[in-house]
Image (spheres, rainbow, N blue to C red):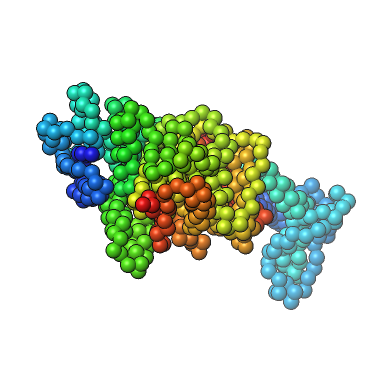
Amino acid sequence: MKLIYKVILRASVGMAAIMICWSVLFYFGMIKVINDEIDDILSDFSEQLIVRFLSGEKIPLSADDVTGQYELLKISEDVADELPQVRFEDKEMYIYRIDDHVASRVMKTIFYDNTGQYYQLTAATPSFEKDDIGKSLIWWTISLYALMMIVSIIIYVTVFYRCMKPFYVLIGWLDAYKIGQTNRPLENPTDITEFARLNDVAVRTMRRNEQIYEQQRQFTGNASHELQTPIAICINRMEMLMEDDTLTPQQMEAAAKVLESLGNLQKLNKSMLLLSRIDSGQFPETEKNLSLRTIIDGMIDDYKSIYAHKKIEVEYLPGNDFHCDINRQLATTLVANLLKNAFVHGDNGKIIITLSEQAFTISNGPAKEALDADVVFQRFAQGKHRRNESSGLGLAIVKSICEQFNLSVTYRFIGNYHTFTVEKRQKPDDAPNL
Amino acid sequence: MKILVVEDEKQLREIIKESLQKDRFVVETANDAASASDKLEAYSYDCVLLDIMLPDGNGLDILRKIKQDGRKENVIIISAKDAIDDKINGLDLGADDYLAKPFHLAELSARIRSVARRNNHGGDTTVRIGNLEICPDSREVSVDGKLLDLSRKEYDILEYFINRRGRLINKLTLAESVWGDHIDMADNFDFIYAHIKNLRKKLNEAGSGIEIKSVYGLGYKMEENP
């Protein structure tokens, strides 16, 4: 969820709560004010009537007046004692003047004359429909809420993106950043202290990562380079030893095993050296539109004969070709490693090689289960598929080569076939998505 | 043949010396650029094995000097830097061959022989062993003057053995040389055996005096029948 949606959503919920409280308070407050006003009028009206009545003026027992209508009722002392002297009520009353039942405010006053006779004066005046007020208040609240939300969203979004622009520029930069490669410098001027700090921290972190990466890369490169000579000397010594005709077959066999292990060590070291050289961009010469079909044609027959004992069926149809801009030596390594991978793990199965203008695909199978696509290109990540003849770097080298030449390599498990696809990478969209 | 080995790494220098002496070469060694120059001033050699990275200078400077003085020494560069640039630089300066470290000793002897052959026989690179003649330029092999019909791989294997006769050839090394580096992951070398079998059969039928022997668990060795 985008940050702005989250902000708007939370603000709307908060605003809604505030608006609801506000309208409830407003409703009760308004009713109180209106009632107070009406009660004052009714009090005056009742007082006048009572004064007139007590002064002996003949007034009808019930009548309708401009102010309201009233009714004078004799009551017994017992009833009078039980009731409060003055009380107010809201109720539907029949108002003569309007000739209808309407919501009214009623004031009941209890008093007595000089004979000790108790009376109850009921004075009523039409007031207002609470339902109507409530309904219109709800309606107004909703409309106001909607209006306020629209206005605030516009303000929020404008202010948000104005303020957060440096943040999005930074995200875009970090997203496009590729360690160990040439990256554009961060241009993100801002007068917001926090973002200026964030920029600074991001640049420093990347610089530090870059240094660590460089050190590690150099270390691997130097280590493999330095190992080369001692390994070669060991191999040469063993070879000389084995040319000694006085060796017994047992000694020969032991020596052969040592030599074999040394050979594996040398292969591993060569792969590490190659990987380090690819990563440090030591293969700059790029050939435009190199045809992968030509490269595959050059080695497929060798592979078929080398792995003939594995009884693998190879489906490689003539037709389309995949062209890309790549160093020829590395293109050969790329194809060789993918082919090797398919052949080494393809016992009694089938290998399908497909080329199109868009992609180069090589599948082998059928297999029981998919490999873990997340780690398949990681160095030495062989898991339970480990083979003695494999260094565990083949696919890592493929990935490194692809990255150098703007290609992508992906692994999928399609119809029980392990499928590796090399494609041209789309231009990375590093513009922040505002 | 007299050879000067210029190499700063002691172990490697010694093993190259031992191995070349076994092949009946006369070997002198130098461990830095200064002593190499001194030796080249004082003596002449048939071949110089030159390391590029030396503690007190660049091997390419020695090469330049040899060529400037118009000397006839064949120069084979041996360097750990197998970058294409170095190789081109060396060959441009007039080196006869380039061998990237690490290399197999058998490979080194073969290169020395091949360079010497090229330069000493007026460009005729034909090799004769007993009644067998192999001409690398036309890729033709004949026994008693009769052409042998070999497949591409069989020819490559035979040429590899001829240049390294008498030495033990590791199966893996043979496979890498004939099939290319990309086969190095093969776990089964039956495919080599099939080719060797055919080659043996053809050599026998033609009555050649050479034999490719299997060496237990490791590889092959080519020997001349007395």
Residue at 65% from the left image edge and 47% from the top image edge: A315
In the rendered image, residue A48, in percent from the top left (x then y), is placed at 72, 54
In the rendered image, residue A172, in percent from the top left (x then y), is placed at 48, 38
* Count of marks placed on residues: 0
Residue at 23% from the left image edge and 39% from the top image edge: B1
Residue in front for this viewpoint, B199 or B59: B199
Task: Locate the C terminus of chain A and report the quarter of the image it occupies.
Answer: top right
Q: Can residue A290 be seen by looking at this rendering? A: yes
In the rendered image, residue A183, in percent from the top left (x then y), is placed at 41, 35
Residue at 57% from the left image edge and 39% from the top image edge: A297
Furthest-right residue in this view? A99
Q: Left or right: where does residue B63 sit relative to residue A250?
A: left
Q: Left or right: where does residue A411 sit relative to residue B71?
A: right
Which quadrant holds residue B216? bottom left
In the rendered image, residue A320, in percent from the top left (x then y), is placed at 65, 35
Q: Is residue A339 above or below residue B62?
A: below
Q: Is residue A204 above or below residue A231?
A: above
Q: Left or right: where does residue B114 sit relative to residue A405?
A: left
Q: Can residue A206 be seen by looking at this rendering? A: no
Q: Is residue A75 above or below residue A124?
A: below
Residue in front for this viewpoint, B74 or B205: B205
Furthest-bottom residue in this view? A78
Q: Left or right: where does residue B166 sit relative to residue A386?
A: left
Residue at 75% from the left image edge and 69% from the top image edge: A118
Residue in front for this viewpoint, B156 or A234: B156
